Image (spheres, helix red, strand yellow):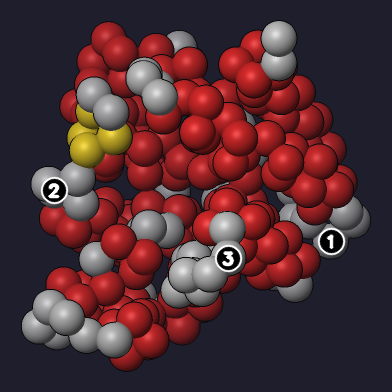
């Protein structure tokens, strides 16, 4: 069953069950770290919502997609996928700092905490997919797209996380409602060719089967963006 269909029918519990099924294939020694990452994500995003659902659902889908459809069994990558928004959204809580810290201070402390709890590679992967502090005098969407292209250009494994995130947002745009639909389509559409290039590169650590699946999903996302934005 497609991941968004699981979400619609079974909600968070269905996605947790699906993730547990995927993780059951991992060596027992790896499962405590994966469980710890899942519960940390659930705790940090406990009050966050995405349209009609808990934000955790998005994080679970991103991780499941990487395991199931991208054939990835790298534990650090899956942990980083589960926590890919933790530093961006909740740096002070993650780092144990009081609210109101400067962006750079909170971000650095949150990444250091991820390195302590898991390892430096997990922190580096999350750093690569964490948006910077945007300049107030420039278009935020342009800055977002520039950061994605620049950061992923030099970090092949981060591409795997970010394209799953993009797929969830882009293909899943039909599950968004209201004015936000067109807003997100305009934000994400210019990234389709960027991801086609990044995923097609020889150093992107995915099988041909996984890359073909991603290319199909990018084509579907582009079709949906066109239906929203083009007359």
CA distance separating discs 3 and 1: 32 Å
Nearest to the eye among marks 3 and 1: give it: 3
Q: Quadrant of residue 70?
A: top right
Question: Which disc is residue 138 wearing?
Answer: 3
Taking the image as shown, residue 37 lies to the left or right of residue 189, namely left
Nearest to the eye among marks 1 and 2: give it: 2
Tell me where residue 184 appears, x and y as whole percent: 51, 34
Above or below, 218 relative to 93 = above
Q: Count neighbours of disc 2 (C-alpha within 10 A) and say few if under 14, some if 14 to 19, many if 20 or more.
A: few
Asked if marks 1 and 2 touch (Cβ < 8 Å), the reply is no
* Circle 2 residue: 46
* Foreground of the two, 204 or 218: 218
Query: Residue 162, can we see it?
Result: yes
Q: Quadrant of residue 109?
A: bottom left
Q: Secondary structure at mark 3?
A: loop
* Circle 1 residue: 203
CA distance separating discs 2 and 3: 32 Å
Above or below, 219 relative to 214 = above
Q: Residue at x 36, y 65 (%)?
A: 88
Q: Residue at x 40, y 24 (%)?
A: 179
The disc, 3 or 1, on the residue closer to the chain's N-terminal end is 3
Tell me where residue 170 appears, x and y as whole percent: 57, 30
């Amino acid at each position: 069953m497609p991941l968004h269909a699981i979400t619609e029918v079974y909600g968070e519990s269905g996605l947790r069950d699906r993730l547990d099924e995927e993780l059951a294939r991992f060596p027992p020694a790896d499962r405590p770290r994966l469980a710890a990452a899942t519960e940390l994500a659930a705790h940090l995003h406990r009050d966050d919502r995405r349209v009609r659902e808990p934000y955790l659902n998005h994080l679970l889908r991103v991780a499941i997609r990487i395991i199931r459809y991208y054939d990835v069994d790298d534990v650090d990558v899956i942990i980083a996928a589960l926590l890919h928004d933790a530093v961006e959204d909740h740096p002070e809580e993650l780092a144990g700092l009081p609210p109101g810290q400067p962006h750079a201070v909170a971000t650095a402390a949150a990444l250091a905490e991820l390195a302590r709890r898991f390892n430096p590679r997990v922190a580096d992967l999350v750093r690569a997919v964490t948006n910077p502090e945007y300049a107030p005098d420039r278009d935020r969407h342009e800055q977002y797209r520039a950061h994605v292209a620049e950061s992923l250009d030099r970090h092949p494994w981060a591409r795997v996380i970010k394209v799953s995130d993009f797929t969830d947002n882009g293909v899943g745009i039909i599950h968004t409602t209201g004015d936000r639909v067109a807003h997100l389509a305009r934000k994400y559409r210019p990234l389709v060719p960027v991801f086609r290039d990044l995923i097609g590169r020889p150093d992107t650590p995915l099988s041909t089967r996984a890359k073909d699946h991603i290319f199909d999903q990018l084509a579907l996302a582009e079709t949906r963006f066109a239906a929203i934005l083009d007359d």
